[in-house]
Image (cartoon, grey):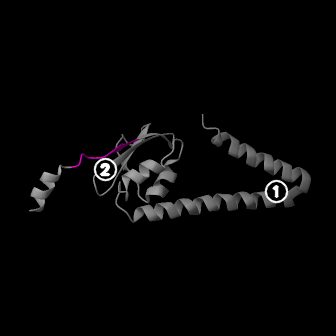
Amino acid sequence: MNFQKILVPLAATGLLAFAYKHYQWTGVALVVSGLVTWALLHFSRLMQILKRAANRPIGYVDSAVMLNAKLQKGKTLMHVIAMTKALGELLSVKDAQPEVFRWTDGTQSHVTATFAGGKLQSWELFRPAEKPEIEQKIEAS
């Protein structure tokens, strides 16, 4: 269960009650302004991340190997989008859980990540097999 959906509103309500009990409406105004500031900071960060991602191709990352090294279980989808600076290519059915996204780099290596409830559950790095040197020399000729 996602306790943030319960704890954040409870904490805000508790702060408002505490502020009203000890400082009346002045305290309530101060707590409300703090909560609005907190919400605006998160909203502006979200918009900045999406603005950067809008300028790149969907599912592209500079280095899939570096992305694989940076990923950690439990990171949010928004955090991964901020790291890659690109939206992931959706591989699962839209609005179905778990969500599966893929980011591919220029060498056709890709990271396939599975998100459940917006949190990273697992990921897998795929690297294509390198061609033998003889084939590379023949292609260069």
Give the secondary structure at mark 1. helix
For residue 102, the mark is none
Toward the viewer: 76 or 26? Answer: 76
- For image coordinates 82% across by 56% down, the residue present is 28
Q: Is residue 30 left or right of residue 35?
A: right
The residue that disc 1 covers is 28
Quadrant for the C terminus in the image: bottom left
- For image coordinates 43% across by 61% down, the residue present is 53
The vertical placement of 139 against 120, above or below, is: below
The vertical placement of 92 against 34, above or below, is: above
From the top left corner, tell me how far across and down residue 98 is, in percent: 44, 37
Q: Earlier in the sequence, mark 1 or mark 2?
A: 1
- For image coordinates 78% across by 57% down, the residue present is 31
Q: Amino acid at mark 1?
A: Val
Question: Magenta span covers which residues?
Answer: 124-130
Between circles 1 and 2, the one closer to the viewer is 2
For residue 109, the mark is 2
Quadrant for the N terminus in the image: top right
Instruction: Assess disc 2: are there few (<14), some (14-19) or many (≥20) residues with their C-alpha within 10 Å of its C-alpha.
Output: some
